[in-house]
Amino acid sequence: MIKGYCRAGKTQKAMEKFRDMEGRNVEADKITYMTLVQGCYSEGDFDSCLSLYQEMREKGIEIPSHAYSLVINGLCKGGKCMVGYAVFEDMIEKGCKANVANYTALIDSYAKCGCIEEAMKLFERMKSDGLEPDGVTYGVIVNGLCKSGRLDKAMEYFQFCQNSRMADNAMLYSSLINGLGKPGRVDEAERVFKKMIVNGCPPDSYCYNALIDA
């Protein structure tokens, strides 16, 4: 019933069924919680994801690695990077290995909160853990460095992506175009835009807007 309500987008009804279980002395297991966490995440209700995670901890219920990922990603999307980091550390402590997506979500959240140094520390930790950053991770790093005014470092990472033939993505280019445009380095921004087209990465509206703004 809970899964059915979640699939139908009726998460509130699913939560009512979940609480009804308690009244009937039926213990919820990790599958029940996982189903609800997924339902709440898909509806953008990240606070409920966190509440369900905390409830699982308090009851001593095993937390699946995917549940950790959803809670971390949800908190990061909601701008709660420090709480997301606390859940991340708890996940590792419980023996669940972090993946590239977990690190990238945290790096992005810290960078967007203006904590670029913390973001870079996580980036280095990710590599020391034996995880290889992908194009999305580098896009997040370049975006964060550009917004913090560290353009030369952003250019270094951009060039690394080009040299290693990593898959290009629009975020990487738009971040750099925007970053170069702000201080008036318009010629460089235009060169990056042209390189994007030559490399077969179709410009999106963000890239055009960044260049027009520059």
Image (cartoon, rainbow, N blue to C red):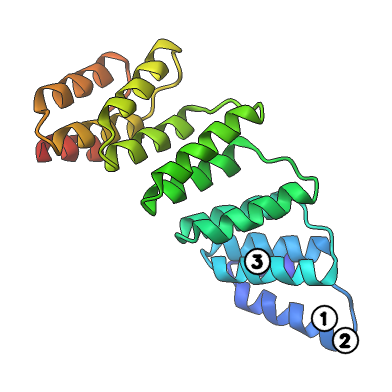
Residue occupied by mark 3:
6
- Residue 24 is marked as 2
Q: Is residue 20 left or right of residue 121?
A: right
Task: Please tell me which residue is depicted at 72% across the width and 62% down the height of the picture.
Answer: 35
Residue 63 in the image: x percent, y percent? 78, 57
Q: Secondary structure at mark 1?
A: helix
What's the amino acid at mark 2? Arg
Residue 11 in the image: x percent, y percent? 61, 72
Residue 179 in the image: x percent, y percent? 22, 36
What's the amino acid at mark 3? Cys
Task: Please tell me which residue is depicted at 66% across the width and 31% down the height of the picture.
Answer: 129
Gap in angstroms between the C-alphas marked 2 and 1: 5 Å
Q: Are marks 2 and 1 in contact (CB under 8 Å)?
A: yes
Gap in angstroms between the C-alphas marked 3 and 1: 16 Å
Q: Secondary structure at mark 2?
A: loop
Residue 69 in the image: x percent, y percent? 64, 50
* Residue that sits furthest to the top in the current view: 163
Q: Is residue 94 above or below residue 170?
A: below
- Residue 21 is marked as 1
Q: Is residue 68 left or right of residue 109?
A: right
* Quadrant in which the C terminus is drawn: top left
Gap in angstroms between the C-alphas marked 3 and 2: 21 Å
